[in-house]
Structure formats: C-alpha cells, structure tokens
Image (cartoon, helix red, strand yellow):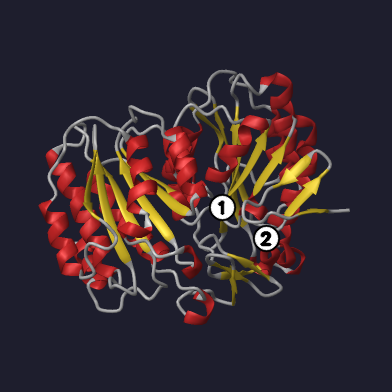
Amino acid sequence: MSVLHILKGLLEQPGSCEGRPLDLVFVIDSSRSVRPEDYERVKTFIKDLLLFLNVAHNQTRVGLVQFGSVVQNEFFLNSYFEKQLMLRAVERMEHLASGTMTGLALQFTREEAFSVARGVRPGHMQLPRVAVVVTDGRPQDSVEGEADRARRAGIEIFAVGVGRVDLVTLQAIGSEPYAEHVHLVDTFSQIETLVSVFHSKLCAGSDPCASGTHECEHECVNTDHSFMCRCRKGFTLAPDGKACLDCKRGSVNLMFVISGSRHVGITGFDLLKRFVSRTVSALPAGSRVGLLQYSSKVRSEFTLGQYSSASELQRAVAAVRYMGRGSVISAALQYLIQNSFRNSSRTAQRITVVFTDGHSQDNVLKWASKVKADGIALYAVGVGETAEEELKFIASEPQQKHAYYAEDFSQMEQIADRLKTQIHSCEGTAACVSVMVSQQYILYPRLKLYSYTSPFIYLLI
C-alpha cells in the first residue's frame, strides 16, 4: 500500500481535525496550461483536504472558485454544510482550459466568496478566513494589488505553485511569513505531498501545547498562531525543532555556503572569508567543517572532515579564490543536501551558514525547504537591502535566532561573533531562552538580527 493511501486512510478517520472553525475558500487555476490529468490531481488534492475538515454549519465552511479567462464559482461558503455534497460538487467540476486571470479571481474571492451574503461569518466572531490559491503559471493580469486588498480584508492566503511558477508572483499572492504561506512543488503529481502540511495548518487548535500534540521533548511555548519548543538549560533544540540535544556531547557538522557572485566584489569576498575563519576559530572538539562557494555554478572548496584543526581550516579558507560571476543559491542548497551531508553523522548537530547578497537568479524557497525538512539547521546571513527578503525563505525557525542582516560587509565580524555564541555555546540554553520565548528583534548598531513575528524592537546594550 502506498504512503498516500495510508495517509488518506488516516485523514478519513472521524475527528481527525480538532482545530477551531474557519471559513475556507479554494481558488483553483483552471487555465489551458493545466493538463487534464493534472486538473484531476488538483481535484483529488481538494477532496483529500476536505476529508479531514469538520464541515458543518457551525463548524468549518468551505467554498470553491476556479478561474481561467473568467472566474467561475463552484460553491459558496453557505452552499453546502455536508461533506459528501461538497465532494460530489468537486467531482463534477469541469476544466475551463482558458487564460490565467489570477487577479480577477482574487477580486472575486474578496468581494463575493468572502461576503456575508455568501456565507462568511461576521467579524465579531473572530473566525479565521483562509484562501488556498493553487496556480501553475504567470497571471495575465495584476495580482499584487488584489492580493493586498484581500489580506487587508482579513483573509489569510496560502499560495501553492506548481512547476515553473514565478516566485515573485507567489510571494505577491501569499500572506507573510512566506515560509509558512508559500509552497512550491515540481509537478502536479507531487501536490498530494502538501496534504499533511495543510492538515497541520488548518487543524491547528487555539492551544496546541495544552492539546498534547506538539511532540516537544522538554517544554512547549504557545505563540500567537502556533507553538515553539524550548529546551532546558544545558540542552540545545535539535534541527527538527522538537528534540533536545545535550550540549556536553555537542560536536557539530558545519557547512558554510558563501556567495562568490559579482555583486559581492573582491573586497567583500575577502571579508566573507575572514567571517568564516572567525566563526570556526573555537569549534567544539570533534566538529567537522566544509565550505561551498556558489556563483554561476557551485564549487566545493573543501568537504566535511577534510581538515581537522582550526589552523588547517583557516589556511584552506584563505586559499579560496573568488569566482565573481552570477548567483545560483538554490543550486548550492541542492548540492548541499545531495552531497555535503550525505555521509555525515545524524547524532551530531548538522548546521549550515548560508550567505546571500539578495541577487539569486533561481528558486531559493524550494531547496531551502528541502534542506530544513532533512533536519539541517539553516542560519542565513544577508548583506544589503536586497538580501532581506531572501533571509525569510532560507533561515530556520525561529527566524529571530537564525536570520542575520547587515547593511554592508563591515559588520560581518559582529555577525561572526554572534554566530559563534549560538553554535559553540549550544542553542536553547539560558542565554538564548528569553529571545526564543519573547520573539523580539535584536538590533545592533547598523546590524539587525531579524524576527518576523513581533512588532517590538529592543536595543541590546
């Protein structure tokens, strides 16, 4: 029996979704670029999601819109309150096979699908309003303005892209943080892999820690819309975000992924090498370090365990030559997961420090997600204004501990010192706990350690 059949069987169990009620609308791309067999896969995806939802008049309400050159409503939030009727309506859907008017579909979703007349619950009930947009191509109209108006109307938007979808367009559609709301798969045959992702998102209760489903080894801490795990003093949070590792046993497998693009410049690249040397100057005994450089291609400068002492590592770093061409960061992340950590120990922490200048020419989100899903902790370091957005996609959660930004290369030494504290002293110890729980920003002179979940800013004196 396939994994998908097993998963589907689990989702069909009664009571599988225990979250609070919500108003949910699917917005489906039905353009001619979607092949008939792929259109059927999208219908299966919707039906699988419906299976675990607690559909009823006073529970979750569901609507469905598809779009091509025109927008066609299949059913509104108040059309059906029985799951079987919804499933039949999805099965009856017919492929429009026309253009891609995504902006028009978002406008219809906001003005009609989420109107009180069409079944959305009034605002004073404070129920989530969620739209799941599935698309495989570039829109033929403007989406940014309509998506912004929908979000300001209180609609949380998840954007699912299939194939060669423009990432900028998906970001324009989806709500922030993008790492939680923007999802990419290579083909429609892989869209079923997102069922479990949306199961956890749509079924999240108001108090996941109290529900006992969090799987945190030591402590669970509620956040505004989810939860985070925390370890007791002397332990570090494992890359899976749930288990806790004993700091005293804490050797690491540490990979650096640095940019050799023309935007960095030779002076900036030399400062990057100093940044790497400074960070590895006092690693725990038994740690292994490797280095990748990416530009228009990826080059392995040295592998994990190739050098055993800090002095050897620093000499190897000093000998690295600047490539000085393009910027294909996702190719570097792909190489990282397929090669760099292939033979690394799973008992040691697996950490990667990724440098970005914000000029990547490829799909960062897809491969960053795969690296994190493999249990590798990603620290993202960005320089320059264009790097800020990419930090969100690359860094592990919580981002206020894993994403670093500086206005220019002169601040790299401060970032290196901060990273040494995080990596060497053990993530999740007492020194870090207040940052983890409060979800605050930390602001250095001209240097920012970002959190994307809190509006508050504190100065670290």
Disc 2 residue type (three-letter)? Gln
Q: Say what secondary structure mark 1 lies in.
A: loop
For discs 2 and 1, the disc positioned in front in the rendered view = 2
Residue 382 x, y percent position in the rendering = 65, 37
- Within the image, what quadrant is residue 11 found in? bottom left
Residue 71 x, y percent position in the rendering = 25, 40
Q: Which residue lies under the disc numbered 2?
A: 439
Q: Is residue 386 left or right of residue 314?
A: left
Q: Is residue 263 above or below residue 109?
A: above
At 31% across and 40% down in the image, what residue appears?
Answer: 135
Q: Is residue 193 above or below residue 295?
A: below
Which residue is at the front of the view, 437 or 101? Answer: 101
Disc 1 residue type (three-letter)? Ser
Q: Is residue 306 something that shows in the picture?
A: yes
| Number of residue marks | 2
Q: Is residue 319 left or right of residue 36?
A: right
Whether residues under marks 2 and 1 lie with C-beta atoms below 8 angstroms apart, the answer is no
How much space separates mark 2 and mark 1, taking CA atoms? 14 Å
Instruction: Point out the residue furthest to the front here.
Output: 117
Q: Which residue lies under the disc numbered 1?
A: 396
- Within the image, what quadrant is residue 427 found in? bottom right
At 54% across and 60% down in the image, what residue appears?
Answer: 239
- Within the image, what quadrant is residue 293 found in? top right
Residue 347 x, y percent position in the rendering = 53, 63
Residue 301 x, y percent position in the rendering = 57, 32
Q: Residues within 10 Å of mark 1 (few under 14, many from 20)?
A: many
Q: Residues within 10 Å of mark 2 (few under 14, many from 20)?
A: many
Q: Is residue 68 above or below residue 91?
A: above
Q: Is residue 96 left or right of residue 114?
A: left
Which residue is at the front of the view, 168 or 157? Answer: 157
Give the mark, 2 or 1, whose residue is nearer the N terminus: 1
